[in-house]
Amino acid sequence: MSIRDRFPILQKKVYLNSCSQGALSLDVKQAYETYLRDWDEKGSPWEVWMERGEAARQAFAGLVNAEPDEVAVCTSVSAGVSALASALDFSGERNKVVVSDFEFPTIGQIWHAQERRGARVVHVPAAGNIIPTERFAEAIDERTKIVSITHVCFRNGSRLDVPAIVELAHRQGALVLLDSYQALGTFPIDVKALQVDFLTGGTLKYLLASAGLACLYVRKDLIPDLQPTTLGWFSQANIFAMDIYANSPSPTARRFEAGSPPVPNIYAGLAGINLIQSIGLEKIETHLLELTGAIKEGAMQRGFTLVTPADPARHGALITLRSHNVTQLVGRLEEGGIITSSRDNNLRISPHIYNNLDDVNRLMDCLTHHKELLV
Ligand SMILES: Cc1ncc(COP(=O)(O)O)c(C=O)c1O
């Protein structure tokens, strides 16, 4: 079966909204059916469900080249990062949190919530559609506890120079959290090569599965000294000890988990990640470079304003165009059978492995038809 045939929606729509939600595959649909069948046939198969949870941990670890014990399986990026933030000590001299202005709101909100615990949050502002690395150099100093950056910005598709920022942070003794939600599933990611201390992301977008499943990578040697206060029984060393008299965190990154795992999302997430891995991230990366290249070229030829940086090394799978009235533009495209989305005044076009150049051509024709809505 071809890749496109695995996604029934493609028979009816040009689907270019993977930055928001990956298209539903037959594989993920079947995974949900398997979940229901297991529940129906086995009753309460918690052993099976726990095994699936461990399989999800391994799958996330495999995606980013981590060890399974370095991965917490969370219900959202927000939950994982909140647990991480709760484990950091801001009471001393080193209390500064450096946050890029390209972060998803949840990240900024979580760090600002730590102000009550002594954190000082400093934002690194953008210069147009990029954040120059020098701006991080100005913000990061010997009082910086953590530098919190996004891999690819959800608003404009801009990709930060992660290795350069990690080097700046580590030179000052600061930790680095990388939010890879908009990158996971679009190109190979290796936490060891990037040398990030923490990485997070979820399955909703380019991992082709559902909301309610995410991961938090925590570098192995950091785990023993990080004691989250946002937790639950699934974060304990022995989940089924049922000890009401003590908090005994797991020695692994599981200490960043909380309550009962999101079992249906784990079935779906595993199917999505397995599908991505069976295609291969190098192949996906090459395909997306071709498609994003064609979108940028088509837009520039027609005189549309590209918000995303043109340099392929400086953007992810998301290309954004400036619009006078983006809500109307998304609506017009939808009437033409083309699914996109928007943030700010930007039209977000986010292809995946299941898109092709015909999709790009149809998009360009429709945009040309509505060019009065573009800048
Ligand atoms: C870059 C990025 N980070 C975080 C999130 C939110 O993650 P969650 O809803 O799992 O907390 C999103 C979702 O849109 C995102 O794009």
Image (cartoon, rainbow, N blue to C red):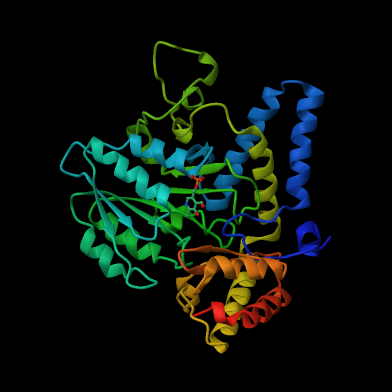
Q: Position of residue 305 (x, y in %)?
A: 48, 80
Q: Quadrant of the N terminus?
A: bottom right
Task: Say whether residue 26 is left or right of residue 316.
Answer: right
Q: Position of residue 2 (x, y in %)?
A: 81, 63
Task: Say whether residue 354 is left or right of residue 240.
Answer: right
Q: Residue furthest right?
A: 1
Residue drawn 32% across and 70% down? 132
Q: Of 93 and 163, which appears nearest the observer?
A: 93
In the picture shown, does residue 125 fall above or below 253?
A: below
In the picture shown, does residue 362 fall above or below 108?
A: below
Q: Position of residue 271 (x, y in %)?
A: 70, 46
**Residue 343 makes an appearance in the image:** yes
Task: Say whether residue 193 is left or right of residue 264.
Answer: left
**Residue 296 makes an appearance in the image:** no
In the picture shown, does residue 283 fall above or below 166?
A: below
Q: Quadrant of residue 246?
A: top left
Q: Position of residue 75 (x, y in %)?
A: 54, 37
Count up the numbered dots: 0
Q: Of 107 and 246, which appears nearest the observer?
A: 107
Residue drawn 15% across and 43% down? 93
Residue drawn 76% across and 27% down? 39
Q: Quadrant of residue 52?
A: top right
Q: Of 318 and 45, which appears nearest the observer?
A: 318
In the picture shown, does residue 78 fall above or below 102?
A: above
